Image (tube, rainbow, N blue to C red):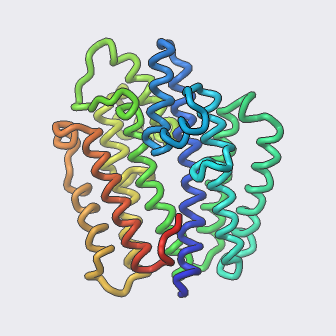
Amino acid sequence: MLSRTADHLFWMSRYTERAENTARLLDVNYQTSLLPQSAEVALLGWEGLLSISELLPAYQARHGDITPQRVMEFMVKDENNPSSIISCLRAARENARAVRGSLTTEVWETQNQTWLELNRILKSGLLESDPGEFFEWVKFRSHLSRGVTVGTMLQDEAFHFLRLGTFLERADNTARLVDVKFHAVETDFMGTADEKDQEYDFYHWSAILRSVSGFEVYRKVYRDVIRPERVAELLILRPDMPRSLLGCLNEVMSNLAMVSSDPASETRRRAGKLCADLQYARIDEILANGLHAYLTQFLDRVNEIGAHISREFLVPSTH
């Protein structure tokens, strides 16, 4: 396959997944901001969201003071912000249009329809009147895109590059989602919380679980009240949880094996090492060293794998 075609497919799925995960991040923060808390703590949450997305300097240069409404607009419909939902869905559509010949008609039409519908929805004012409903719509369109891809595409190299982009992006975003709280308060979590924090923690971790559609899964697996260390274990180390870090890395490994003929390549070595580290890790060891520190290191390693995939298979990165 031409590296340019592979590049468009990889980034089409990454941008679709990024739009969905931005909606999930915003949804968690929006729900958490509705809890009883001081205005300063609420603003810290929005600042943490920008910080974990590496957008704080860009936001401050454009808007100055942090307000929930401005952050939402910046993260959803600011066309000058390359990570906003509108920018991601436009980029996904542009990448899809460049490789229409490698996609089924339904995959292309789903991407195109999402873009057209997004503009209509933003004009209708749904984001301002019901943010939760808007975020659900973004998630639904991403689910639809993924379902149509799996349901109609031939499982050849094109399919595996699409899946590779999806799971690499998802690993990155799940780590950011779990880390967003600690980024906000610039503290780390070592597995214990004082009484004052415990009630807030319950609602915060519940919001995180709901944002990754993991609330029912948690109840099924642990049959217990929501405890931060167990939520962290579910979203980091459970191989059977579709949005967990280990679940994503397992998928990255299997899709890499389908597109790479060299088992000794540096890309597969790094991905395999990270996968093995997750597979044999224990949550108490992670918490002993600090969850925030662990996730920061994980993000660095995922970005390195992305850079190696670009060098080995794709057009030199401009994304």
Residue 82 is left or right of residue 172, and the answer is right
Query: Does any portion of residue 88 appear in the rendered image?
Result: yes
**In the image, residue 303 above or below residue 260:** above
233 or 80, which is in the foreground? 80
Q: Quadrant of residue 188?
A: top left
**In the image, residue 19 above or below residue 265:** above
Residue 87 is left or right of residue 165, and the answer is right
Residue at image position (52%, 83%) is: 3
- How many marks are shown on the rendered structure? 0
Give the x, y percent position of residue 206.
Answer: 45, 29
Query: Does any portion of residue 215 appear in the rendered image?
Result: no
**In the image, residue 299 above or below residue 48:** below
Give the x, y percent position of residue 61.
Answer: 55, 38
Give the x, y percent position of residue 259.
Answer: 43, 81
**In the image, residue 157 above or below residue 73:** below
Residue at image position (65%, 53%) is: 87
51 or 118, which is in the foreground? 51
Residue at image position (71%, 72%) is: 97
Give the x, y percent position of residue 58.
Answer: 53, 43
Residue 72 is left or right of residue 281, and the answer is right
40 or 219, which is in the foreground? 40
Residue at image position (36%, 40%) is: 221
182 or 195, which is in the foreground? 182
